[in-house]
Amino acid sequence: MIEWISSDGLTEYADAVAFMEARAAAIAAGTALECVWLVEHPPLYTAGTSAKASDLVDPDRFPVHTTQRGGQYTYHGPGQRVAYVMLDVGNRGRDVRRFVQDLEAWVISTLAEFNLTGHIREGRVGVWIERPDRPATVNGDIAEDKIAAIGIRLRKWVSFHGLSINVEPDLEHFDGIVPCGITDYGVTSLVDLGLPVTMADVDIALRRSFDTVFPALTQSADAD
């Protein structure tokens, strides 16, 4: 079984990290269930293990948290659904690349609930939406905006951190960073795309599509 937790209000980032680390340790020890935690944060920036100082454009705009997840700079804030995944990757094939692909597939399946087609692009982390309503890129490609970010950490083959989907955040808040180090593309949200979607709608879609990507475990595995 997987425990689902949904927190009301805004969760402080340091509190979230402390909870994830404790829960991941308990999962590795076999004393707690796997967990998916749905939260919103107050406005803040996080710096992943590959973050470049030059990508923090406005360091005084919001609090900046250095984090152990993979990736570069990311924004979190109200109107964005963050899904923290504390899963036993050791008992799910011990394939980190496949695990990240499964997280991407989960996002894409969730977006499909709203008749949106999410895309994965080589060299660009996250999930992207094509914007044929906008001018093509300098290379003649269809314009694209990022709608979801992914960044994880594994400890003893248990994951923590996870993904974020832009439901209705203030998109101007992304201007204080170069999101994930990518400069040639924009950021969008479900509401920005004209969809009257609420956070509750997204939570239902996340829950409904999760089992199609991450089947329940039937046995536990010893952690390294």
Image (cartoon, helix red, strand yellow):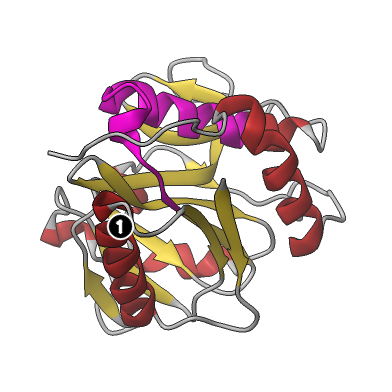
Q: Position of residue 6 (x, y in %)?
A: 63, 68
Question: Label 1 belongs to which residue?
Answer: 24
Q: Position of residue 71 (x, y in %)?
A: 25, 46
Q: Indicate whether 58 appears above or below 27.
A: below
Displayed quadrant of residue 169: bottom right
Using the rendered image of the protein, determine whether residue 114 is visible from the camera's viewpoint: yes
Displayed quadrant of residue 142: top right
Which residue: 18% across, 58% down?
A: 68
Which residue: 75% across, 40% down?
A: 208
Is 89 part of what is drawn in magenta? yes
Quadrant for the N terminus, please.
top right
Q: Position of residue 32 (x, y in %)?
A: 40, 59
Callout 1: SS: helix
Amino acid, disc 1: Ala
Which residue: 56% across, 24% down?
A: 119
**Left or right: 203 as drawn, with respect to 185:** right
Q: Position of residue 140 (x, y in %)?
A: 51, 15
In the image, the segment drawn in magenta is 85-108
Q: Residue furthest top?
A: 140
Is 124 part of what is drawn in magenta? no
Q: Is 194 or 142 nearer to us in this picture?
A: 194
**Left or right: 74 as drawn, with respect to 47:** right
Quadrant for the C terminus, please.
top left
